[in-house]
Amino acid sequence: MENLKYVKYEKLSLRNHPEYNEKWVQNKIAQDPSILGLGDVILKDRERIQPRAGRLDLLLQDSDSNQRYEVEIQLGKTDESHIIRTIEYWDIERKRYPQYDHTAVIVAEDITSRFLNVISIFNGFIPLIAVQMNAIKWGSQISLVCTTVLDQMSLGLVDEEEEQEVVDRSYWEKRGTKATVAMSDQLLECIHSFDTGFEAKYNKFYIGLAKDGHANNFAIFKPKKKFLRLEVRLKKSDHVEEKINDIGLDLIDYTKWGRYRIRLMKNDINAHKDFIKELLEQSYKETMG
């Protein structure tokens, strides 16, 4: 067993530090944007000039999608002007480049409970992420540790959050086939391996899940003519994507609503049942908290 040595670190305040200032922080994030915990993102621009509104600290883009992040850095505590500026830059960018999906990101040393409450009011209407950043020192070394304290909440989806027109199994057997609808039964059996209380709920736009009469769509199924599309709600993860690809499943994409969409062919469920069960259970646990 590896013998690890305990080291006590010192937390630094960067707000009034003569050397490790906001420009230093910006440089470090620009060099390695992954430290923010936003996934596989790359630097698109920094100190980006905004018409009549100053400069955006950092513009990041997901390497595999059209997702962009408008990032504003604040040393010390969050304040009103910082929140307004972050939202303003996000709004300018989304209007200038509507072909991209945009998310505002506030990075600060201290995100107070008061401003966390204010920010959470916007979240769901404005896609916004709050990241608390701490500088820690041990010996002659310094590092930045970033923690997401408010994650982006999905905007209400019509086919998930609002009341749906209920259909029956035959509706989906016509839209798809009996064989692809039967695949949804197999997936429900996988779910029953960790929670037997769920049942299929046939909606007009998807086959969802319900427990004790209440919808809980951590996974939804969309039978097609030649395949079934499985959508599982999970945090974006390179590890998950690598496993999906390595095992040979057809990963379609990751949606801005926080779902992996996977195309399943007839034999995929039997061939990869253990992994699919693991994926569904992970989604279930994340949703249940």
Image (cartoon, grey):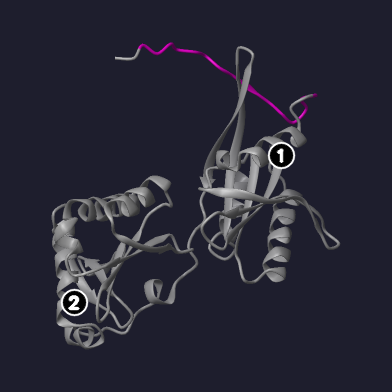
Identify the amino acid type marked 2. Answer: Val
The percent coordinates of residue 52 (x first, y second) are 86, 62
**In the image, residue 151 above or below residue 215:** above
**Res 181 label:** 2
Q: Camera-side residue: 277 or 269? A: 269
Give the residue drawn at x 34%, y 50%: 286
Q: Is residue 37 visible?
A: yes
The percent coordinates of residue 42 (x first, y second) are 60, 49
Identify the amino acid type marked 1. Answer: Gln
> Does residue 209 appear left or right of residue 78 in this picture?
left
Give the residue drawn at x 69%, y 38%: 77
Main secondary structure type of the part rendered in magenta: loop
The percent coordinates of residue 275 (x first, y second) are 22, 51
Q: Can residue 75 be seen in this view?
A: no
Give the residue drawn at x 68%, y 43%: 78
Q: Give the range drawn in magenta.
A: 3-18
> Does residue 83 appear left or right of residue 227 in this picture?
right
Of the numbered discs 2 and 1, the one sitting upstream in the chain is 1
Residue behind mark 1: 26
